[in-house]
Amino acid sequence: MLRNTPIAAIIILIAILFSQQAYGKIFTVKVLADKNATELKLYVSPMTTKSSSRAKELKSSAGNVFEGNVPASNTGFYQMVVMKDGAQYYSTAFFPDEDKNENIEVRIEHHALIIGGTNENNLLSEFSRVAAKNGRAQWEMSSPDDGKLYGVLKNYMLAADSLVAVTDCNPAVKDYVKLWALTQAYNGVHSAVAQALRSGRNLLFTSRDVIGDYSNALDCSLAVLFQETFLMINKELPRDTILLAKFDALYSRYTNEDVLKKMSEFLISGFMTRHNYARDFDGGLAQLRAVVEKYKLDNKYIAEYEKRRATIKGAAFPADVVLRDAAGNVVDFSTFKGKYVYIDMWASWCVPCIKEVPYLQELEKELKNTDVIIISVSVDKNEQAWKKKMQDLGLHGCQLIDKENKLYDALNPKGVPFFVIYDKEGRLYMHDAPRPSDGARLKNILEGLK
C-alpha cells in the first residue's frame, strides 16, 4: 500500500501517528443521563505521579456521547467528572494500557458516577458511591451528634476494607481505594473540626481516633495522587521551626521517592509563600540553601527564592517581566519612569478583583496628582478571557497582561487582587498597598506622593 508513496510522506505519516500515540488515549464516553438534563459536560484528567495535568473537557456529540484525546497516565488512573444541571459527579477510573483507546459508558446513580466494565472499575465505582453517601450524610446532619458523626467518618475505612476484601482485581486499585478512604475520612474530620469550632465546642474524637497512624499508608507513589496527602504529612512534621528541621523529620519517616519529591516541593512552596523577605531575606535564603545542599535538591528553588528580592522596598522592577497591551505590543516598564505607578494585579476569573473595578474607576476620575499613574496587570493565562472581560466591564486606561505570571511570582502575593506602588525610578515603594475600596486611605497616600 505504501510502495509508491514518497519517502517524505511516509516519514510525515509516521511522525503524525507517533505524536498521536505519545499524546495519550482517545476516550469515547457515553453518559447515561435523563433526557431532561439541560447541561451535560464531561471532564477527564490523568492522575500521574509526575507533572500535574489539567482536566480535559471531552467534546460532545449526539446521544450524550463525548470524545477526546487525554494524556496517558503513568499510573493507569483517571479522574472523571460529569457536570449535570450545575451539579458535579465524579469517580476514579482505571485504564492501565496507555496505548489502548477506551470506549465506555458511565451513569449517575445515587449522587455518584458509576463506571463499570471491569472488576477494577466496579470497585472504584462502588467506593465512589460510598464516598457520595457519607459526604451527604455528614452534610445533612442538622444538629451536633459526635457519636453519629464518628460512625459516618469511620465508615470510609470500614467500607473500603470490605469492598477490597471481596473484589478480585489489580492490587494497585485496592491500594488506591484504601488511600481514597483514608483521605476522605481525613477531609471529613477536618470539616467536622472546623464546624465544631464555629459552634464554640470541641469534638469528642480526634483524627487519630478515626484514621489512626497513617504514615506507613502514605509512604507509596499512589499517595501523591491525593492532595490531602501533603496536608496530612505536613500535620505530622514539627511546627514553628526552621525549614531544615521539617525536612529532617520528613526524610526520617518517609522513603518513597515520589512522596519525598512532591512533599519537598510542597514544603518549599509554603516556605516561600509565607516568608517575610523584607524582614529577613538573607536568613531565609540560608535556611533554603541548607535544605537544598543536605538533600541534594534542584537549585531551581534557590533561583525562585532569589526572585522574591523584588518584594523588598527599593527593589527594582523585575527585569524579566514582559508586559503586553491588548494589541500584543510589549510595554517596557521604563516607559513609566518619572511617575509613581500604582499597579492593580487582577484576573478575569477573580470575583473580588471584579468588585474592585468600580472603586478603581472612581479613583482614576478623582485622582488629582499628575505624578501618579494607574495601570492594571492581568495574570490571566487565557488572553481571550482577559480581553472579553475587559470588554464586558468597559475597562479603559492602561490595561496590560503578564501571561507568564513573572511579576506575580516575583511579588509573591497571597492571591489576587493585589496592589503595589513603584516610585519614579521604577523601584518598589509599597508592597501590598491598599486596595481601591479602601477609599480615603489609598487616595491620601497617592495624593501625597511627590
Image (cartoon, rainbow, N blue to C red):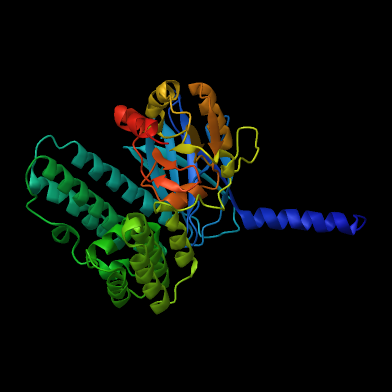
In depth, the one of 101 and 13 nearer the eye is 13
Outermost right residue: 4
Which quadrant is home to the C terminus? top left
Q: Is residue 383 left or right of residue 160?
A: right
- Residue 203 higher or lower than 292, as above or below: above
The total of numbered circles placed on residues is 0
Q: Position of residue 437 (x, y in %)?
A: 33, 28
In depth, the one of 424 and 134 nearer the eye is 424
Q: Is residue 6 visible?
A: yes
Q: Residue at x 13, y 41 (%)?
A: 198
Q: Residue at x 34, y 70 (%)?
A: 287
In depth, the one of 381 and 242 nearer the eye is 242
The image quadrant that residue 420 belongs to is top left
The image quadrant that residue 172 belongs to is bottom left
- Residue 13 higher or lower than 265, as above or below: above
Q: Position of residue 101 (x, y in %)?
A: 59, 51
Q: Residue at x 52, y 45 (%)?
A: 104
Which quadrant is home to the N terminus? bottom right
Q: Is residue 237 left or right of residue 264?
A: left
Q: Is residue 2 visible?
A: no
The image quadrant that residue 267 belongs to is bottom left
Q: Position of residue 62 (x, y in %)?
A: 58, 29
Outermost front residue: 450
Q: Position of residue 113 (x, y in %)?
A: 39, 42
